[in-house]
Image: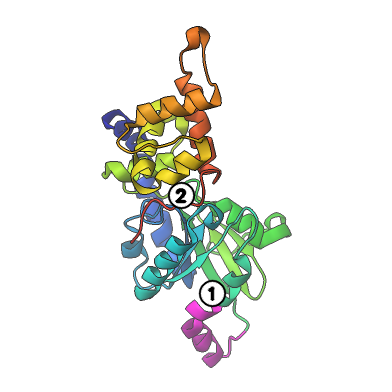
Amino acid sequence: MADFQKQTVQWFPGHMAKTRRIIQSSLNLVDGVVELVDARIPYSSSNPELEQIIKNKPRIVLLNKCDVADSNATKIWIDYYNSKNVYALPVDCRTGKGLNAFIPIVKKALAKTLEKNIAKGMSGKALRLMVVGIPNTGKSSFINRMAGNAKAKVADKAGVTRQQQWFPVGNGIELLDTPGVLWPKFDDPEVGDRLAFTGAVKDEVTDIESLSCRLLEVLSKTRPQAITERYKIDNVDGLQGWEILELIGKKRGFLVRGGEIDYERTAVMLCDEFRGGRLGKITLELP
């Protein structure tokens, strides 16, 4: 794990201070913040400093990729966020599932802002929200899906740098895309693993074979039937990750010259199938 830890951490330090500055300087332009997280790993795919950075601004959490997450676990996460006075919504930005509830939840989360605007005689004033998220949580997909053709019509606004882009999404709501990159909490090895399992960390910087072995060890403890049913294996109880990977390679006939298992091909296939939901709808962490 040590090598993986070093490689991933090196991606982010240059962005951290810059992103923090961008978010802090943009906060006075917006009424609230929309954070995208991966529904399979809401804790690991969230930015640990965001709450502190945005302070009292209303926050809406979109649990993206809910189509490949365990729906009962997603409900538990939504209850957890609600208990913290944070609005949360399960969505799939790729297909648009759940996004029809986004505008109503914005109106709910920003009810006080709407009341203030009406009291000041500015009932038509747009509600503005900043969109944030670590890489691969679906920030761009969300903005494109909500904005539709508006992306081409984005206009420069006074006091806004060219780096910042506003997208009108209808119903008097505008989204601000932040060019900065948020970072996850990499000092916890399990967080690093979960980000890699779900594809948030590029496979090029990980050892795909050892990663797939760790994934199999996690699944063999929490969802053994996902492995046994998908790969027609009798039992994985007590087996190490590499032993399960070997059984899967044999079942799939992934062999190289001499009848040896092609571990890399098996590992790539396993990670692809897990990420695509073919092992079932799986959430890797609960609040």
SS at mark 2 in the image: loop
Where does residue 271 sit, x and y in percent of width and height? Answer: 48, 36
Where residue 82 sits, quadrant-wise, is bottom left
How many other residues sit within 10 Å of disc 2, few (<14), some (14-19) or many (≥20)? many
- Total marks drawn? 2
Question: What kind of residue is marked 2?
Answer: Gly
Magenta highlight range: 107-123
SS at mark 1 in the image: helix
Left or right, residue 19 beside residue 63: left
| Mark drawn on residue 14 | none
Residue denoted by label 2: 180
Residue at position x 61%, y 65% in the image: 99
**Which quadrant, please, contains the C terminus?**
bottom left
Left or right, residue 46 beside residue 148: left
Q: What secondary structure prevails in the magenta region?
A: helix
From this view, report whether residue 203 is shown above or below residue 256.
below
Residue at position x 42%, y 58% in the image: 23
**Which quadrant, please, contains the N terminus?**
top left
Question: What kind of residue is marked 1?
Answer: Val
Decide if residue 261 is in sight here: yes
Residue 86 shown in magenta: no
Residue 122 shown in magenta: yes
Residue denoted by label 1: 106
From this view, report whether residue 189 is shown above or below residue 3.
below
